[in-house]
Image (tube, helix red, strand yellow):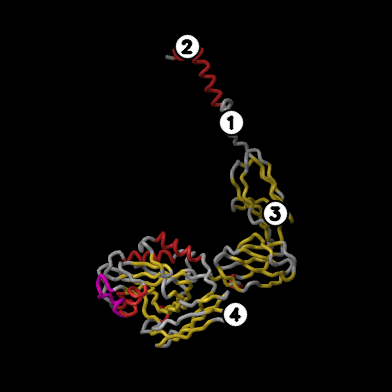
Amino acid sequence: MRFLERSRLREPGAFWALIMALIIALGLGACGREAPSFAPGDITVISTPPGAAIFINGLDTGEITPHTFAGLDATLYNISVQLPDHVSTPGVIPVELAPLDDLTLSFALSETALLITSVPAGAAIMIDGNDTGEVTPATIANLNAGPVDISLELSTYVVTPGSYTVTVIADSVLTLPSETFNLRSQRTVILEGFANTNCGPCPQLTANLLGMVAKPEFTPDRVLYMEYSLSWPNVIDPLYQYNTQENFDRFRTDYNVVAAPSLFTNGLKLADALNPVPMEASVLAALQIDPGFLIDIEANFTMPLIPVTVTLDPARDQDLTGYSLYVVLYEKVIDFEERGLPIGTNGQVIFHHVFRDRVDSPPALGALTVGTPQIHNLNLTRSDWPLDNLVVVAMVQHDTSHTIIQVGSYGETTESEGTP
């Protein structure tokens, strides 16, 4: 057999086939392409001043600046430096090292800097009216000692105060705490669900709403939700029976609900009440629209007849003729077993953000003028519910289209826990 294999190599065709195979294997005949190279590269790290510890991919190398790392594999590296009581600019330099690269990375270290944070993070930072190109949280270095004017900007948020002056101290890194600025969503969106304890798919609606507000982008100043009770498929629903008239007014008179479950975003019905994707998309789209005013609420839950003060604070002049102010009360969590309530046929035991009462005669609205907040004093009825379980919501809603353009709340600082 070996003799036969060797004899084949003596044939011209076989010989040239072997030669071509060797050429291709060596990368010499690949249509002008070069064979991949795994040759190492070098990275030199320097800093001003020198003596900073060097980190690669977050790990301390044990080296200090200036230093050259020779023979590194061609790959991605994240390089940073640290020097006690100094701030590095930039913080991290990502490097895609190519074969045979010889790179030099430079860091500036400053003892005079300002750390600026915000909640939520991601706000653009302006110093003396100039965009720094940084977003919170960030440390702004290489500042001159003395007073500087700080302002923040974040899309779809109202930031107060408009600016804040802080005195930068030489050779010191100051921290501007997150509470320095209040970042509030320019609009609060409300989702209104309609369900019944004997509606089979209705617990899924509750689960979807809970899943949404558990996400960090859906904080209570951006989205609220509330569930009303329908009179079908079984009128013996204790949540409906508690306030039959006002539940009926909402689902029949205001929205003409004919299916369970149903879901509305800012007064507009969603085609599929149980699909969380368009539900969340509708909220995100609504958040992009600035209604031009905010709603603030104060309430005293210790009183059997809850006094509520609703303030509409306009950022621009506008006419709200044709709109009314709906003010409602809901309970954050109701556990049927704890309260001895009869569990419906769908098996749901824990209910969230359950409608309880609303102001009987919603005030009609009119013109809003910048600099002149519009104040409404109203009352809601409270039963013997836990005071920390109550939330007041105010909604500005159009009388005909039922579109809700702005919402405010009192008492909703954290979301409810539990499962449906």
Residue 78 is situated, as x and y percent measured from the top left of the image, at: 61, 50
Residue 155 appears at what percent x and percent y?
A: 56, 64
Label 4, label 3: how many angstroms apart (C-alpha)? 48 Å
Q: Identify residue type, mark 2.
A: Ser
Q: Decide which of 414, 377 is in the foreground and name it.
A: 377
**Label 4 crowd bin: few (<14), some (14–19), many (20+), radius 10 Å:** few
Distance CA(mark 2)–CA(mark 1): 34 Å
Report the residue marked by disc 2. 7
User: Can you tell which of label 2 and label 1 is closer to the viewer?
Assistant: 1
Task: Say which amino acid is labelled 4.
Answer: Gly
Contact flag, marks 1 and 3 (Cβ < 8 Å): no
The mark found on residue 107 in the picture is: 3
Crowd around label 3: few <14 · some 14–19 · many ≥20 (10 Å): many
Tell me the number on the disc at residue 371: 4
Q: Nearer the viewer, mark 2 or mark 4?
A: 4
Check the image and report above or below for 370 versus 171.
below
